[in-house]
Image (spheres, rainbow, N blue to C red):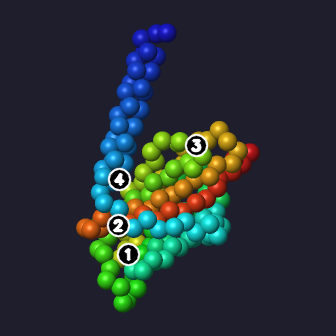
Amino acid sequence: MDKRTLFMAILSVVLIGVLLSLAYYKNQQAQSQQVLLRLTVDQSCDLQKSDCSLKWAEGEITLSITPRPIPLVKPLQIAVQLKSRPEAETKQVQGVTVDFKGTTMNMGPNNVKLIESAPNTWTGSGMLPVCIRNQMEWQADVYLQTEQGIIIAPFIFITRKHY
């Protein structure tokens, strides 16, 4: 192995280690705050076909992921929209993050921080990693950061390899 190849291999390993450490730190930081509410998955909604929404006492959260069908290793456009009920005392959302997890296989941390692009709408782009399985079930946890703590909204979807 020549010196350049060895250097590139070492640099790649170091870079991957730094990225994994940063993702782990960010994930631990988000999880260290108090969870106010963890919503229940709506198994009847299919993110592969449409946007999905979850309701709770204070409002409704809608997650949209495009393109559809949701591909692996290709850019995804992610949008989260919040609707508050007029009579509810709403918590001011300070930030929104989406964490993609494999439900049956650990795919490592995959957090996407969204930015507020319009009132009550956060958007961003992300990517699902490559998977060796032909079919993979994912859970997209939407974390709503408020002053009081975190609200977690889980959404389930399945990806399939397309040959």
Residue at (37, 27) in percent of width and height: 14
- Residue type at tag 3: Met
Q: Name the image quarter holding residue 142.
A: bottom left
Closer mark to the observer between disc 1 and disc 4? 4
Task: Indicate left or right for 163 with 58 as reference.
Answer: right
Residue 146 at what x, y percent from top left? 30, 67
Task: Give the numbered dot on residue 36.
Answer: 2
Closer mark to the observer between disc 3 and disc 1? 3
- Residue type at tag 4: Gln
CB contact under 8 Å: marks 1 and 4: no
Label 4, secondary structure: give it. Answer: helix
Q: Which residue is mark 3?
A: 105
Label 2, secondary structure: give it. Answer: strand
Lower position in the chain sequence, tag 1 or tag 2: 2
Lower position in the chain sequence, tag 3 or tag 1: 3
Q: Is residue 41 visible?
A: yes
Residue extending furthest toward the right? 163
Lower position in the chain sequence, tag 1 or tag 4: 4
The image shows residue 130, relative to residue 4, as above or below, that is below
Q: Nearer the viewer, residue 64 or 105?
A: 105
Q: Which residue is mark 4?
A: 31
Q: Name the image quarter holding residue 120.
A: bottom left
Q: How far is disc 1 from disc 4 in space, using C-alphas?
A: 23 Å
Lower position in the chain sequence, tag 2 or tag 4: 4
